[in-house]
Image (cartoon, grey):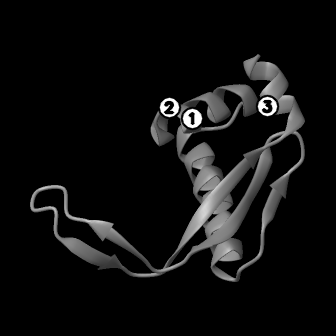
Amino acid sequence: MRKPDLAAIIADKADISNDKASDVLNAILDEITNSLGKKESVSLIGFGTFENRHRKARSGKNPQTGETIQIAASNTVGFKPGKALKTALN
C-alpha cells in the first residue's frame, strides 16, 4: 500500500474528500517526524511505538573489494509493534 492508497481509504471511511484525507495524513506524518526529530518517542496505543535509535560507528567491509571501511555513527528510527497489531497479524 502506498500513501495515496491510504489517503483514499481514510477519505472513504471518514466520508471526506481525497484532498482533505491527504492533508490529514500529511499532518500526522509531519508531526511524527517532528517528534522524532526532537528525540521524543511516538506511541500509538494498540499500533506501536516509533523511537529514535543510535547506531555506533563501526567497521565494515566493501563487498566488491573486501577492503575494510569505517561506517559513521548515525541515528535511525525503530518501531516496536503494539499488542493489537501483533495479534492482528497472527
Q: On the image, numbered disc 3 is attached to which residue?
A: 85
- Tell which of 60 and 23 is nearer to you: 60
* Badge nearest the viewer, 3 or 1: 3
User: In what quadrant of the picture does the C terminus appear?
Assistant: top right
Q: Position of residue 2 (x, y in %)?
A: 46, 36
Q: Amino acid at mark 2?
A: Asp
Q: CA distance from mark 3 to mark 1?
A: 17 Å
| Mark toward the start of the polypeptide (3 vs 1) | 1
Q: On the image, numbered disc 2 is attached to which residue?
A: 5
Q: Position of residue 40 (x, y in %)?
A: 77, 75
Residue occupying the far left of the picture: 65
- Tell which of 78 and 59 is nearer to you: 59
Q: Is residue 81 above or below residue 77?
A: above
- Answer whether residue 86 is visible to the viewer in this image: yes
Q: Residue at x 49, y 30 (%)?
A: 1
Q: On the image, numbered disc 1 is attached to which residue?
A: 6
Label 2 secondary element: helix
Q: Position of residue 78 (x, y in %)?
A: 65, 58
Q: Are marks 1 and 2 in contact (CB under 8 Å)?
A: yes
- Label 2 crowd bin: few (<14), some (14–19), many (20+), radius 10 Å: few
Q: Quadrant of residue 9?
A: top right
- Label 1 crowd bin: few (<14), some (14–19), many (20+), radius 10 Å: some
